[in-house]
Image (spheres, rainbow, N blue to C red):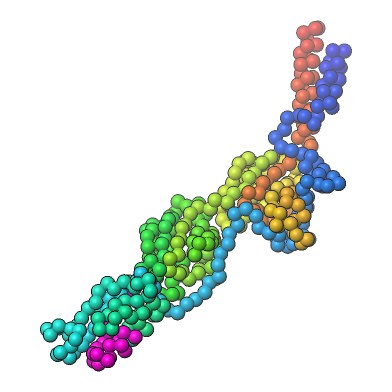
């Protein structure tokens, strides 16, 4: 028995001296949250509740957040742009017409490219400026100018859109390519439909629009959810449809420890926990599930974060904490950390003691 008590006392002493160094899978909440009691804390600690959730949701977005533009409608007819190609047909019934052959009542001027100055050449008229006109306005202008030399002439015009009256749909659809704008109200969803639809293999597809050197992005499910996002396209727009690259990281006493891509436009904290397989029943401290986030210096404001690094705390043992987690949105590059309960460490100590007792009993049996 003396040998047993010596081993038992040794294990207790060892557990007491090295308790903070016992191997475990995640940090304890006290190890992280104690920073808030420092005179000059390195990061801000915020407990999320229903009382402050609206204020927190108004804080700046971080990571690769989406930016989109407002929808504006234009006239139904397209405008002629530089690079468009015009075919002009002139009809004249006069037998001595200056424009038509004796055996024909029609003269066709095919494939006239609108010059960088916005003009096309018409015989007997010279250069006629038609840029920024609708095809009908340009037709009337040419016909009116011809009346002085061909009073009975009638003009017909056909427009083939050039680069400045077309959009490039580059990727993510069945038929990428260059698509002419049929009118100035041609919308993004119409373009996607005309191209054969979005590839089904894309995870949470995102539309990326490049316009006049600026880049805009919106998830497809959000684009489809509200007509105000279905913007009118402009000539020379570039459209790409790609997988969403946003992600958050899951660590600690969670079902999975990994980098998790966003499956849709918005993910709440409670949804994020479900996506990673939930929290470990045996290890996780439900009183302190943490979300770590980095802000920029410009984000630090009186009504916003007070530090560049913020730790949000969720207490999932209360209804208030659960409802708050259901409303709180995850941001790109957030880290969801499930801290470990102290009971797990206690179980580890007891396991060490139990193992030592087993060794002691075996030793006693050998002695006896």
Residue in the picture at 86% in, 20% down:
9
Can residue 65 be seen? yes
Which quarter of the picture shows residue 140?
A: bottom left
* Quadrant containing the N terminus in the rendered view: top right
In the displayed image of the protein, which residue is found farthest to the left? 103
On screen, residue 339 versus residue 185, left or right, reads right
Residue 149 on the magenta span: yes
Residue at 87% over, 13% down = 2
Looking at the image, residue 169 sits to the left or right of residue 208; the answer is: left
Q: x, y percentage for residue 275? A: 61, 48
Residue 315 visible in the current orientation? no
Residue range highlighted in magenta? 141-159
Q: Position of residue 290 (x, y in %)?
A: 73, 47
Picture residue at 18% right of the left edge, 88% below the top:
97
* Horizontal side, residue 157 vs residue 185: left or right: left
Is residue 322 in the magenta section? no
Residue 138 at x, y = what percent? 35, 82
Residue 132 is situated, as x and y percent measured from the top left of the image, at 41, 78
- Relative to 180, residue 281 above or below: above
Q: Residue at x 37, y 84 (%)?
A: 137
- Considering depth in this image, is 187 or 322 the residue closer to the camera? 187
Specify the quadrant that holds the C terminus.
top right
> Which of the two residues, 357 or 296, is positioned nearer the viewer here?
296
Q: In the figure, 292 relative to 106: above or below?
A: above
């Amino acid at each position: 028995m003396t040998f047993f008590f010596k081993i038992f006392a040794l294990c207790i002493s060892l557990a007491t001296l090295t308790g903070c160094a016992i191997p475990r899978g995640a940090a304890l909440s006290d190890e992280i949250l104690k920073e808030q009691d420092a005179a000059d804390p390195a990061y801000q600690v915020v407990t999320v509740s229903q009382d402050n959730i609206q204020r927190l949701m108004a804080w700046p977005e971080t990571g690769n957040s989406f930016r989109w533009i407002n929808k504006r409608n234009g006239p139904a007819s397209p405008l002629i742009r530089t690079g468009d190609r015009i075919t002009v047909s002139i009809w004249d019934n006069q037998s001595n017409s200056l424009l038509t052959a004796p055996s024909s009542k029609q003269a066709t001027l095919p494939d006239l490219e609108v010059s960088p100055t916005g003009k096309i050449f018409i015989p007997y008229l010279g250069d006629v400026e038609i840029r920024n006109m609708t095809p009908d306005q340009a037709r009337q202008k040419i016909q009116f100018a011809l009346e002085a030399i061909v009073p009975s002439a009638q003009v017909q015009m056909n427009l083939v859109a050039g680069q400045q009256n077309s959009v490039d749909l580059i990727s993510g659809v069945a038929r990428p390519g260059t698509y002419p704008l049929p009118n100035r109200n041609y919308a993004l969803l119409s373009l996607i439909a005309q191209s054969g639809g979005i590839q089904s293999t894309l995870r949470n597809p995102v539309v990326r629009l490049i316009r006049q050197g600026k880049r805009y992005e919106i998830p497809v499910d959000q684009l489809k959810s509200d007509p105000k996002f279905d913007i009118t396209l402009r000539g020379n727009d570039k459209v790409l449809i790609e997988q969403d690259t946003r992600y958050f990281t899951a660590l600690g006493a969670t079902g999975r420890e990994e980098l998790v891509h966003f499956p849709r436009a918005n993910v709440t904290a409670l949804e994020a926990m479900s996506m990673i397989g939930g929290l470990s029943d045996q290890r996780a401290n439900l009183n302190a599930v943490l979300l770590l986030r980095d802000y920029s210096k410009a984000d630090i404001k009186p009504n916003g974060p007070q530090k560049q690094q913020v730790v949000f705390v969720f207490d999932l043992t209360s209804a208030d904490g659960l409802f708050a987690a259901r409303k709180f949105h995850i941001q790109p590059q957030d880290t969801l950390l499930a801290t470990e309960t102290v009971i797990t460490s206690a179980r580890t100590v007891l396991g060490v003691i139990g193992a030592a007792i087993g060794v002691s009993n075996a030793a006693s049996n050998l002695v006896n």
